[in-house]
Image (cartoon, rainbow, N blue to C red):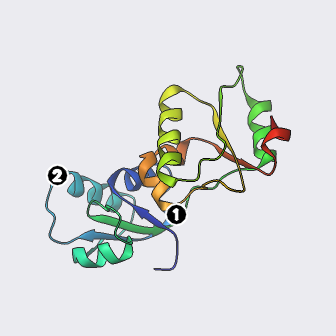
Amino acid sequence: MAGPLLIGIHALRSALKHGARGITALYVDAARRDRRLRQLVDEARRAGLRPQPVDKSVLDRLSGGANHQGVVAEGTMPASRDEGGLEELLSAAAHPPLLLVLDGVTDPHNLGACLRSADGAGVDAVIAPRDRASGLTPVVCKVASGAAETMPFIQVTNLARTL
């Protein structure tokens, strides 16, 4: 696989909802026949993708042992924004923005959980430092369950100066 990985049913469903054009290949477990995976395959086909059935061992290898739930895709990751993106977001806000500021979150599972919680709490953007912190990765996107595609994630050079 050449591009970043999208792993898991929720991450793929969100990616399909927010721009299937970023998905270049979709691999599904040929042996799984459950309703959730069938629905995802149907959504992918409606979006113009051709899911490729493969053996579970192929998915295990592609995902690096992550819990892929029977589906792995190659595609583009959601992009983080920088200080300029934060300025745009703040100037376009119709209400006082609610921001979640993170410092020292290095574990991608924790960042994914923070994005998911922020999305559920109505946060307008998540801000984190660029250095010594986790960025958007396939693991983050999987744990975020779709929030990585919808929640603006801003990585800044100097957190104190940004605040």
* Name of the residue lying farthest toward the right: 161
Q: Amino acid at mark 2?
A: Arg
Q: Amino acid at mark 1?
A: Gly
Q: Give the SS element for disc 2.
A: helix
Mark with earlier residue (1, 2): 1
Residue 1, horizontal then vertical, whole percent: 45, 80
- Can residue 74 be seen at all in this image of the molecule? yes
Is residue 156 placed above or below 97 in the rendered structure? below
Is residue 145 placed above or below 46 in the rendered structure? above
Is residue 66 placed above or below 150 in the rendered structure? below
Residue at 51% x, 69% y is: 4
- Can residue 54 be seen at all in this image of the molecule? no
Residue 118, horizontal then vertical, whole percent: 53, 33
Is residue 14 placed above or below 138 in the rendered structure? above
Residue at 47% x, 39% y is: 116
Q: Give the SS element for disc 1.
A: helix
Crowdedness of circle 2 by 10 Å Cα count: few (<14), some, many (20+)? few
* Name of the residue lying farthest toward the top: 95
Question: Which residue matches tag 1?
Answer: 22
- Tag shown at residue 60: none
Which residue is nearer to you in this view: 148 or 22? 148
Question: Which residue matches tag 2?
Answer: 35
Q: Is residue 40 left or right of residue 146?
A: left
Crowdedness of circle 1 by 10 Å Cα count: few (<14), some, many (20+)? some
Q: Is residue 27 left or right of residue 34?
A: right
Question: How far apart, in angstroms, are the residues tagged by discs 1 and 2?
Answer: 25 Å
Residue 100, horizontal then vertical, whole percent: 63, 33
